[in-house]
Amino acid sequence: MKTKIHSFTDLFVWKEAHTLALIIYKMTKTFPSDEKFALVDQMRRCVISITSNIAEGFSRQGKKEKIQFYYVAKGSLTELQNQLLLARDLGYIDQKLFVSVAETTVIVHKLLNKFIVSAQEKV
């Protein structure tokens, strides 16, 4: 039985991206203070962009417009993946945490891809 989607918060892809946002916020609290307006700020902006663009796309009426917002979310996710590599290589996070968070980004990426395909197929 399918659950009716009433709000962007009902979307599984948004829920997973929201979980990722919470992880990134918690993780970046441990970064050096001199990264507050650099890598921390950038990572947080990216992860916020993911959920925000999913939400905004959800509220748009036109299929093409919806999909464009979902692609922007995907781009922000890819940018975040790059920043995670940098955080690991700078020693701000250890390999175990990196792998865990990176796996979460891959899950969100796959969900976004499926979500975009589904949106493209709808009439």
Image (cartoon, grey):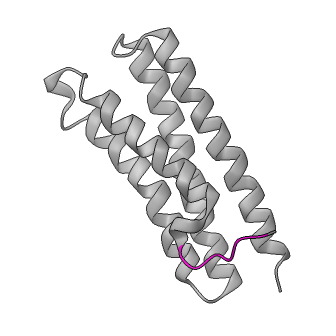
Residue 58 against residue 41 in the figure, above or below: below
Name the residue furthest left.
Answer: 33
Q: Mainly helix, strand or loop, the magenta region?
A: loop
- Which of the image's four quarters has the C terminus? bottom right
- Which of the image's four quarters has the N terminus? bottom right
Q: Total of numbered circles in the picture?
A: 0
Q: Residue 5: x and y, percent?
A: 64, 75
| Left or right position of 48 against 120 | left
Q: Residue 34: x and y, percent?
A: 15, 25
Q: Residue 48: x and y, percent?
A: 39, 54
Residue 52: image quadrant is bottom left
- Tell me the residue at 47%/58% (across/down): 51
Name the residue furthest front.
Answer: 1
- Tell me the residue at 55%/23% (across/down): 100
Q: Residue 115: x and y, percent?
A: 72, 62
| Left or right position of 122 against 112 | right
Residue 64 against residue 1 in the figure, above or below: below
- Tell me the residue at 56%/48% (across/down): 16
Q: Which residues are magenta?
A: 2-7
Viewer-side residue, 23 vs 80: 23
Q: Is residue 5 magenta?
A: yes
Residue 15 against residue 94 in the figure, above or below: below
| Left or right position of 97 against 64 | left
Viewer-side residue, 23 vs 73: 23
- Tell me the residue at 66%/40% (across/down): 107
Q: Is residue 52 magenta?
A: no
